């Protein structure tokens, strides 16, 4: 089975990712691209309809984890050790969020990942993330 | 020259709780996750009841890291907004009745948020409490801890910086 299909099934098995409507658009070689449709239930500011930072964080965290799993040298699963998100601007109300994560370095124990979140204006990211994840060996 | 008689305790309590409820219920995402706030004086504890849809790892099972981050961020934002609001209500600058009627203050905006995952979130209720380490006119720094069965064994903690809403008027 190809990795895209595997990763898709993996994420679809995560109840919370499914609840938020997260889906893969691409995955492979330590990188992952995901999409989350706009949903009024995830709004943080009802006056503007802007998504809550927590929902953006959840999508970035999931995409980063997927990038670690998709790294060719990573034998197993992963868990987040630490993740920092910088919120550069509010996501435009009504627009889907797209994220891209890259696992740019992997040691025996730790994976290093960075990610970006965008709405329709891809030139100006909504948020960027930097994180460390566990590398789980095969037992 | 007589001092005004303090209001009956139930009246004060009811008004404060209603103001807090108005603040919390104004945020759809807080409702979506099912987070409620328990108030003791000015101290708030966020409560996240466990639900299947919060699972991130069905094998363990464990709460999704995004849910943990969201709980921490919601607690930080509401905790920060409440601490400012509390002072304003006490000083008479904000009328709690207006809040209850739906005229809600703008919430602080997250500038950055860093989560430390200490252990996996178990499939049971989680709690969180925020500590406002600095609250200035423009910027604030908040630390949050989340725990489950044992307060002394936090399963995640976070620090974030926030942009304060510009003063009304």
Image: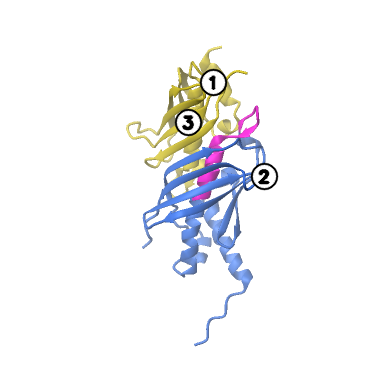
Local SS, label 3: strand
Q: Do the residues at pointers 1 and 3 share their chain? A: yes
User: Which residue bears the numbered disc 3?
Assistant: A132
Question: Do the residues bearing badges 1 and 3 touch, measured as CB atoms within 8 Å?
Answer: no
Q: Which of A45/B145 is in front? A: B145
- Span colored in magenta: B56-76
- The answer to whether residue A26 is seen in the rendering is yes
Q: Is residue A51 left or right of residue B24?
A: left
> Which residue is situated farthest in the left direction here?
A123
Q: Do the residues at pointers 3 and 2 share their chain? A: no
Q: Residue at x 53, y 81 (%)?
A: B4
User: Which residue bears the numbered disc 2?
Assistant: B149
Residue A58 in the image, given as x and y percentages of width and height: 51, 35
Label annotation for residue A85: none
- N-term mark: 1 or 3: 1
Quarter of the figure that contains the C terminus of chain A: top right
Q: Which of B155/A65 is in front? A: B155
* Chain coloured yellow: A
Q: CA distance from mark 1 to mark 3?
A: 20 Å
User: Which residue bears the numbered disc 1?
Assistant: A7
Q: CA distance from mark 3 to mark 2?
A: 26 Å
Q: Is residue A42 above or below residue B94?
A: above
What subunit carries mark 3? A
């Amino acid at each position: 089975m190809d990795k895209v299909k595997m990763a898709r099934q993996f994420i679809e098995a995560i109840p919370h990712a499914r609840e938020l409507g997260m889906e893969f658009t691409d995955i492979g070689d330590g990188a992952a691209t995901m999409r989350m449709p706009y949903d009024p239930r995830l709004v943080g500011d009802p006056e503007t309809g802007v998504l809550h930072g927590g929902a953006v964080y959840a999508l970035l965290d999931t995409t980063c984890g997927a990038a670690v799993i998709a790294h060719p040298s990573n034998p197993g699963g992963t868990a987040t050790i630490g993740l920092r998100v910088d919120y550069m601007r509010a996501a435009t109300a009504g627009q889907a969020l797209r994220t891209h994560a890259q696992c740019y370095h992997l040691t025996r124990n730790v994976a290093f990942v960075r990610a970006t979140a965008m709405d329709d204006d891809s030139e100006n990211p909504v948020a960027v993330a930097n994180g460390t994840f566990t590398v789980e060996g095969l037992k | 020259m007589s001092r005004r008689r303090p209001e009956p305790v139930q009246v004060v309590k009811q008004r404060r709780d209603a103001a807090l409820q108005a603040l919390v219920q104004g945020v759809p995402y807080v409702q979506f996750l099912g987070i409620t706030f328990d108030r003791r004086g000015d101290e708030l504890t966020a409560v996240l009841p466990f639900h299947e849809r919060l699972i991130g790892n069905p094998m363990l099972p464990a709460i999704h890291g995004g849910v943990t981050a969201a709980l921490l961020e919601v607690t930080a934002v509401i905790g920060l907004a409440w601490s400012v609001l509390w002072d304003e209500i006490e000083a008479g600058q904000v009328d709690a009745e207006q809040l209850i009627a739906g005229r809600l203050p703008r919430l602080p905006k997250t500038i950055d948020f860093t989560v430390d995952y200490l252990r996996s979130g178990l499939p049971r209720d989680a709690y969180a409490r925020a500590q406002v380490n600095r609250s200035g006119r423009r910027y604030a720094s908040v630390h949050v801890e989340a725990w489950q069965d044992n307060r002394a064994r936090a399963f995640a903690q976070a620090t974030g910086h926030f942009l304060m809403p510009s003063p009304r008027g």
